[in-house]
Every structure is written in C-alpha cells, then in structure tokens.
Amino acid sequence: MEMSKQTIGLIQTAVSEDPDHNLKHALEMAGSAISKGARIICLPELYRAPYFPQYEDADASAYAETIPGASTEAFSALAREHGAVFILPIYERAASGEHYNSAVVVDADGRVLFPAYQKVHIHQDPPIYDKRYFHAGDRYRLYDTRYGRIAVLISYDQWFPEAARAVALRGAEMIFYPSAIGWISGERSPGSDWREAWETVQRGHAIANGLHIAAVNRVGEDGCIRFFGSSFIADAFGNVIARASEANEEVLIAEVDPSINEAARERWNLFQNRRPETYRALIRKFPPGKTPQALGYRMPAEWEPHDAVWLAWPYDREMLP
C-alpha cells in the first residue's frame, strides 16, 4: 500500500515502576498526539516497564502481558474512536510461555495486526542483560495499515543495516524504531557520543534505503541509566524533520511525505544495482578470524597433555554460540 502524506506522533516519556500508571500516562499522551493531528503514533520500547534488563536477576513478571491484553484493549478502543494507528512496544508473554521484547501494531479501525514484531537482535553487555529476559524473534514484519505500509524494528535492531534493508526490499515506506537508550553511569567518556551515533546510524538507514524513519526514546533516570531522549523523524535523504529534547517528556509531531522515497531510491538506483551474489559474508555469524575456534577456545580432552587443570571453561554461552 502506497503511503500518502501523514502526520506522525512520537511519545517521548519517562517510565515508572507501575505498569498501570504507565499505561494511563501513555493514553493521555496519545490523546495529546491525536489532538495535534497525528495518525500514526509510536511509544518507546517496553513503554509499561522500567528498564529491568539492567539487573541480572530482576523479577519482571509484573510487566509481562499477553496479546491481546491490557495494552491492546486500551489502544484498540482509542484507535476506533479516532482513526489512529498505534505502535505499542511491550514485554510479551507468548502462549508458549516464552517472553519477547515485542511491538504490537493496532490499525486505525482497532484491529490488532498479527503477528506482533518480536525483536530479532538481543543485546548482552553488562550492565545490560537482555538475553536473560528476551527470546529472539526470527523474522521481520511489515504492516499494511490504513495509512500505509510500515515496519517496526526495536532498539538494538537499529545498529544492524541488514534489518533496515530487509524491510525496505519488501516495500516498507517508513521504519519505526522504538528505543530505550541512554548513558550508563560512569561510562560517558570524552570523545564518545552515543546519542550522536544513535541518530547518525538511523539517518544512514533512511538514506541507504530511501525511506523515512522515526525513532522514539525514553527520558529520565532509571537505575544506572539516564535516557537521553532526542526522539526524531528523518526523511529519505536523512534530513531530520523534527527532533525532541534530551530530557523532557513531549509529544513530537511531524508531517512526512513518503512520495520522496522513490525519488531518493531512483537517484542512486539503490535496489536495482544490488549484487546479492557478492554478499555471502553477511550470512556468517562471525568474521572468519573471530570464531570461538579461531580465538583459541578449545577444551583439551582429559587424556591430552595440558598445562593446567581447567576449573572453568572460558566460554560465555550468551556471547558465543
């Protein structure tokens, strides 16, 4: 479905430990976005929960919800009343009992567009322990909404150009990136600007794929993280159409015109001149020199001569396969 000019709303908000309060607050801010003309509205990653993956052994059960569930019930009613599309990033408890970092798309008539997108790339770098809480999704999704074909990628997905290219090749006119990213206490160093890098890489995806992107982040402090906000919307040439502050809750509103997407793609023949037969290295999990074997991770058999008794195998199953 070709996407016409639309008004986009991004809900940049702080998040409390009370999921019911977070839902109510999100509904209020969504109402504000609707009053300003927004027709596609996106909330930040895990909008009903504090960022519990910063703790190694948190009990996150209170933040898990099913689909359908509290979020879809509330926002489906709002969608039907106002004809708005909503993107709802939640901590999903699937029927299988597994948990996912997911995003639900509710169309303008209140229908939930199944299946939800389940975050594909899961980060693990203490003090962030995402792999302890989230199963990885295994595919990218496109959603044909009343207002056009969109894709949703979540937070860490934004660092992987392959994800953006995959949905662009299938016809996405706009990618939404709900995020929860900020400064880790004591880790902000001179010369490194993750806020700038976060924006730049996503603007690069817009340019390389000839589409619009919208990235929405949290604000406020949560444990060891100070979220840096800066939600933004960029067009197919990477121009930032609108940008939110680093510290304040706000509803970011901008009109997008996806008709320029095709012009951007055709100017550089971005898709026509691809050479997929040369991209074989992209399907390898590690570069050749970075496999566990190449790095020297090998346990000697007990009958083999070795210099020491291995009390612990130097292997992290969450970082290496």
Image (spheres, rainbow, N blue to C red):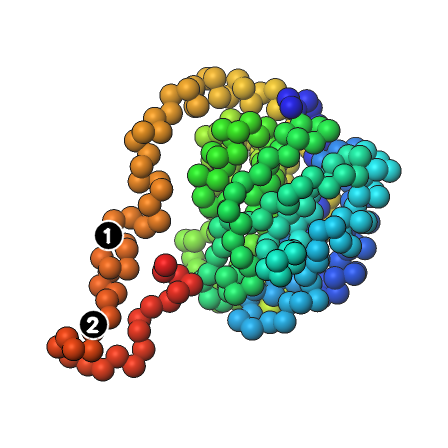
Pointer 1 residue? 289
Residue 39 shows up from this direction: yes
Residue positioned 46% across, 30% down in the render:
208
Q: Is residue 235 above or below residue 214?
A: above
Residue positioned 32% across, 50% down in the render:
286
Residue 87 is left or right of residue 202, and the answer is: right
Pointer 2 residue? 300
Q: What's the CA distance linking mark 2 and mark 1?
A: 21 Å
Residue count near mark 1 (Cα–Cα under 10 Å), binned few <14, some 14–19, many ≥20: few
Provide residue 86's location: percent of width, then percent of height: 73, 41
Residue count near mark 2 (Cα–Cα under 10 Å), binned few <14, some 14–19, many ≥20: few
Residue 227 shows up from this direction: no
Q: Secondary structure at mark 2?
A: loop
Instruction: Specify which label sits upstream in the sequence, 2 or 1.
Output: 1
Provide residue 235's location: percent of width, then percent of height: 57, 29
Q: Is residue 216 above or below residue 142?
A: below
**Residue 239 sits in quarter:** top right
For the residues bearing labels 2 and 1, Cβ distance under 8 angstroms: no
Residue positioned 64% across, 22% down in the render:
2
